[in-house]
Image (spheres, helix red, strand yellow):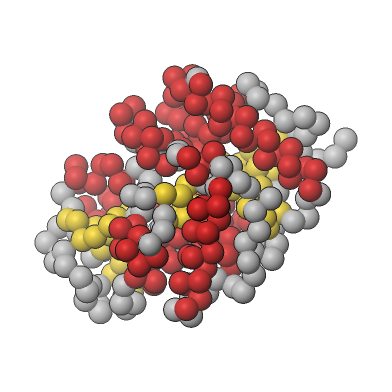
Amino acid sequence: MSAPLRIGLSTCPNDTFLFHALLTGAVRPRGLELEFVLADVEELNECMLRGELDLAKTSFHAMLAMAERVRVLPTGSALGYGVGPLLLAAPGRRTELPLGREALVLAPGRWTTAALLLELLLERPARVEHAVFSSILPRLAAGDADYGACIHEARFTWRDHGVGFVCDLGELYERLARAPLPLGGLCVSRALDRNTADELSHAIRDSLEWALTHRAACLPTMRRHAQESSDAVLWAHVDLYVNEWTRELGPEGRAALATLARLARERGLSVGTGELVVV
């Protein structure tokens, strides 16, 4: 028997919601054995860049950098309006742009789309430090950095930590691009044959449809891996990031990927030269 396929997903509620049926066996792919790796999104980016996973939830920034080695699945993307990272300030820091040249800005990983947006949308800060996404909000609250690009659950809980709001990077991007913001999606290695990639895509779509029909059944898996314990926050996360483009990228979603690549390349940012291909 061939080795199981290594599938990477983040611990965020939208991903554990999407994959719950596959994780628990409620949905099974035909003829494929899967091994799941749950990790921080930047860990998944780096694993996929090193070729250690067959399929993974990956930031579109990272995907653009390895476009010649992966294909995008049409299901499973986090893409839309009003979904972007928030730029937040430590207590007592100014909350207007531009940021000071000496400001220390935390970002959730070199290959995250949040890091790409900081370069694309703002005057390049003098000091950027990459940190695990879940550590950024506590570090800001403690005054351990000046600013931070906050993602995932922090979008819903930042007001409880005494930090200041600078801007919504997603809104800035939407004004520039006149398109929805592509944050991340599922990509599959081009080393896999097309039949296997198609079966994985079908299985993930079935898992999503199962989750949408059995929402409450997914909650234990979401709770087990989430950074926040509030069920209200978990469902707010799912309701924001699981949308029509999660089911199917469609023409508008595909165009949004091309727009992100074009804007990044026009600014001379490191996104490679290959074009993303959707399975």
Q: Quadrant of residue 29?
A: top right
Residue 51 relative to residue 185: left or right: right
Residue 244 relative to residue 155: left or right: right
Identity of the residue furthest to the left in this view: 92
Look at 56% across and 31% down and name the residue there. 208
Is 96 in front, or is 170? 170
Residue 155 relative to residue 184: left or right: left
Above or below, comparing residue 159 to residue 169 in the picture: above
Q: Position of residue 213 (x, y in %)?
A: 51, 21
Look at 34% across and 27% down and name the residue there. 231
Q: Position of residue 39 (x, y in %)?
A: 53, 45
Look at 62% across and 61% down and name the residue there. 276
Residue 189 relative to residue 135: left or right: right
Q: Quadrant of residue 63?
A: bottom right
Is 53 in front, or is 261? 261
Q: Position of residue 179 (x, y in %)?
A: 41, 58
Is 80 in front, or is 233? 80
Is 64 in front, or is 106? 64
Identity of the residue furthest to the right in this view: 1
